[in-house]
Image (tube, helix red, strand yellow):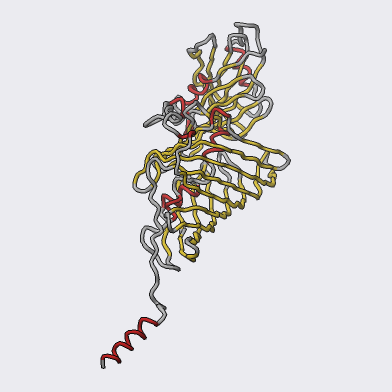
């Protein structure tokens, strides 16, 4: 009997372990003070549709972005990096939009960037001073490295197990200002040679720059089991973007390759001495502003981030004010004739100029007065109601004259219902404009 029982036990031990699935812990917990080198390469193709004078124009797009970043986590909350310092060893964005070639990069004095989450949004700034809108897009619109750990399951899983991606992670990695819905799920598909392969699939709908965006996503994540770290992501995405107040309709396809390497030694670019300029809490207000410089050297100004440049010609600069995606007003900056030093057009001449604007049918002037100014400048404001190309609007016209006779006309156009919403933001923008003297 004993020999028989022993033989049965041996037979059981020799049976293959079919049905006994192995559990894997695929977590990654970020810690304050960790340093990584991250490379992000994105290729994009597609088309965008613009409308000018009622005619639609379809432009083909091809783009390539190449970033190499040293990143140090500064604040971690509930398993998510809330603040990090980034030093950009490389930051190159180039695109062909129709016949136009666009290149964007960072100035050498803006290579150190702080990425800080504020509520559900990512806020990027340079401790060295205000960035331009183009520089902000270079650092704020690439793949979000702070939320990638959210792609991992929050429990042990076996091969073929699936899990739902959190709303916060879906919104962050989709670069949405607001998330409407998503069904992104993760799935462990393979474990081999010390690596786990995870597939992320699904759709996400959201709002960006006041426009509706629909995404189809399929991504592959390579996870290192020994050190519990994501080391590579391949992210393939299809975009369908509706026209918004600050962006055109577009159909895009992109592929992003993210590679991460843990740095055991602290890079000198992210040392304590290198980060002495990084604010411990909120940045100064000036660091939140963006800088615009006229290509012809006629003016420059700092502005809040809710103003977006949507058009430029040799004679006009057009900006739009968005408040959490809602279109509030349009501002147009126009260079006017130069007078003798210390001189400017009279209020009567300015009012006559406004009444003769193309497409503008003046119904009545609400207010007209001189606005206090500094640095030898002169500012005159006219608020008027009327009809602009068949639409009832309120317009605030400003004449800004520099001490050497240079003159700019700044026009703010809005629907009557938005006249109160703009508040003092029109006056703040005008006061920020520095009229530059021609050499």
Up-down relation of residue 215 to residue 145 (above or below):
below
User: How many numbered marks, from 0 up?
Assistant: 0
Q: Which of the two residues, 117 or 405, is positioned nearer the viewer here?
A: 117
Q: Which of the two residues, 434 or 392, is positioned nearer the viewer here?
A: 434
Up-down relation of residue 308 to residue 357 (above or below):
below
Up-down relation of residue 372 to residue 124 (above or below):
above
- Quarter of the picture containing the C terminus is top right
Q: Which residue is depicted at the point 41% across and 62% down?
A: 163
Up-down relation of residue 84 to residue 78 (above or below):
above
Q: Is 328 left or right of 168, judged from the image as shown?
A: right
Q: Residue furthest front?
A: 3
Q: Let me know if residue 137 appears in the view.
A: no
- Quarter of the picture containing the N terminus is bottom left
Q: Let me know if residue 169 appears in the view.
A: yes
Instruction: Tell me where residue 191 appears, x and y as whole percent.
Output: 47, 65
Instruction: Tell me where residue 306 appears, x and y as whole percent.
Output: 49, 33
Q: Which residue is depicted at the point 44% across and 53% down?
A: 229
Q: Which residue is depicted at the point 44% across and 58% down?
A: 225
Instruction: Tell me where residue 216 appears, x and y as whole percent.
Output: 54, 57
Q: Residue furthest right?
A: 99
Q: Residue furthest bottom?
A: 1
Instruction: Tell me where residue 118 appears, x and y as whole percent.
Output: 40, 38
Q: Which of the two residues, 206 or 157, is positioned nearer the viewer here?
A: 157
Q: Which of the two residues, 371 or 308, is positioned nearer the viewer here?
A: 308
């Amino acid at each position: 009997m004993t020999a028989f029982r022993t033989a049965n036990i041996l037979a059981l031990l020799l049976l293959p372990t079919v049905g006994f699935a192995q559990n894997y812990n695929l977590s990654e917990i970020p810690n304050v003070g960790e340093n990584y080198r991250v490379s992000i390469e994105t290729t994009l193709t597609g088309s965008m549709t613009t409308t000018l004078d009622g005619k639609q124009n379809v432009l083909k797009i091809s783009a390539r972005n190449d970033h190499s970043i040293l990143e140090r986590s500064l604040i971690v909350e509930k398993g998510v990096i809330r603040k990090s310092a980034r030093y950009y060893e490389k930051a190159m964005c180039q695109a062909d939009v129709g016949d136009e070639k666009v290149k964007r990069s960072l100035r050498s004095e803006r290579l150190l960037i702080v990425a800080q989450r504020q509520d559900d949004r990512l806020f990027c700034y340079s401790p060295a001073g205000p960035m331009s809108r183009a520089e902000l897009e270079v650092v704020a619109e690439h793949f979000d490295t702070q939320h990638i750990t959210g792609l991992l399951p929050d429990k042990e899983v076996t091969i073929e197990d699936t899990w739902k991606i959190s709303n916060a992670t879906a919104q962050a990695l989709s670069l949405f200002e607001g998330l409407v819905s998503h069904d992104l799920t993760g799935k462990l598909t393979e474990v081999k040679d010390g690596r786990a392969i995870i597939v992320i699939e699904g759709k996400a709908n959201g709002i960006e720059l006041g426009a509706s965006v629909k995404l189809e996503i399929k991504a592959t994540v390579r996870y290192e089991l020994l050190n519990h770290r994501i080391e590579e992501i391949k992210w393939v995405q299809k975009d369908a973007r509706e026209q918004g107040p600050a962006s055109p309709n577009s159909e895009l396809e992109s592929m992003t390759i993210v590679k991460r390497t843990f740095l055991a030694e602290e890079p000198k670019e992210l040392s304590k001495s290198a980060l002495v300029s990084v604010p411990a809490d909120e940045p100064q207000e000036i660091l939140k502003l963006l800088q615009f410089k006229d290509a012809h050297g006629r003016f420059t100004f700092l502005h809040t981030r809710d103003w977006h440049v949507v058009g430029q010609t040799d004679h006009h600069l057009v900006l739009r004010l968005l408040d959490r995606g809602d279109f509030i007003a349009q501002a147009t900056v126009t260079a006017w004739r130069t007078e003798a030093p210390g001189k400017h057009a009279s209020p009567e001449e300015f009012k006559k100029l406004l009444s003769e604007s193309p497409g503008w049918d003046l119904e009545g002037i609400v207010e007209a007065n001189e606005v206090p100014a500094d640095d030898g400048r002169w500012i005159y404001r006219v608020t008027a109601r009327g009809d602009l190309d068949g639409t009832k609007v309120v317009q605030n016209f400003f004449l800004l004259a520099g001490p050497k006779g240079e003159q700019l006309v700044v026009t703010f156009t809005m629907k009557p219902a938005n006249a109160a919403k703009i508040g003092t933001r029109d006056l703040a923008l005008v006061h920020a404009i520095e009229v530059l003297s021609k050499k």
